[in-house]
Amino acid sequence: MFRLWAREFKNNKMLRDTVVADDSDDTRTHKIFRALDRVCYEFDLGKPIWLDATVTEFKRHRKARFWQDNFIEEIPFDYLEIQVIEED
C-alpha cells in the first residue's frame, strides 16, 4: 500500500488535508504523480511544477512543499505540502 498525505498551510496553520491511497502495481514515481493529480483535483488546484529544489527536498525527506513559485496561478494559501507516509 502506498499512501500520500497532502496539506495546505497558511500562516503556519493547516487549512485542509487529505490522504491518497494507491495499491496498484505501478512504479513509485507514477503513484506519486497520480496521487498529486488527485490532490489537486480534490483541492481544485492547478498542477504544481516540480522545481529542482522541490525534487531534491522530496528525495531527501519523502516530503515536499510547493510554494507560489511552483504554481502558475495564484494560490489562496502559503504552501502545499505532500509527504509519503506509507510505501510497500
Image: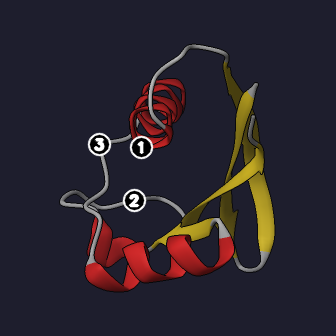
The amino acid sitting under disc 1 is Thr
Say which residue appears at 52% left-offset and 32% top-offset: 35
Q: Which residue is mark 2?
A: 75
For label 2, the crowd category at 10 Å Cα-Cα, with few meaning under 14, some 14 to 19 and many 20 or more, is few
Relative placement, left or right, of 74 versus 59 is left
Q: Look at the picture and state if 4 lies above or below 7.
A: above
Badge number at residue 46: 3
The amino acid sitting under disc 3 is Gly
Label 3 SS: loop
Badge number at residue 29: 1
Q: Looking at the picture, how far across and down is residue 80, in whole percent?
A: 55, 60
The colour scheme used here is: secondary structure
Quarter of the figure with residue 50: bottom left
Task: Evaluate whether residue 36 shows in this view.
Answer: yes
For label 3, the crowd category at 10 Å Cα-Cα, with few meaning under 14, some 14 to 19 and many 20 or more, is some
Mark found first going from the N terminus, 3 or 1: 1
Say which residue appears at 77% left-offset and 79% top-offset: 12
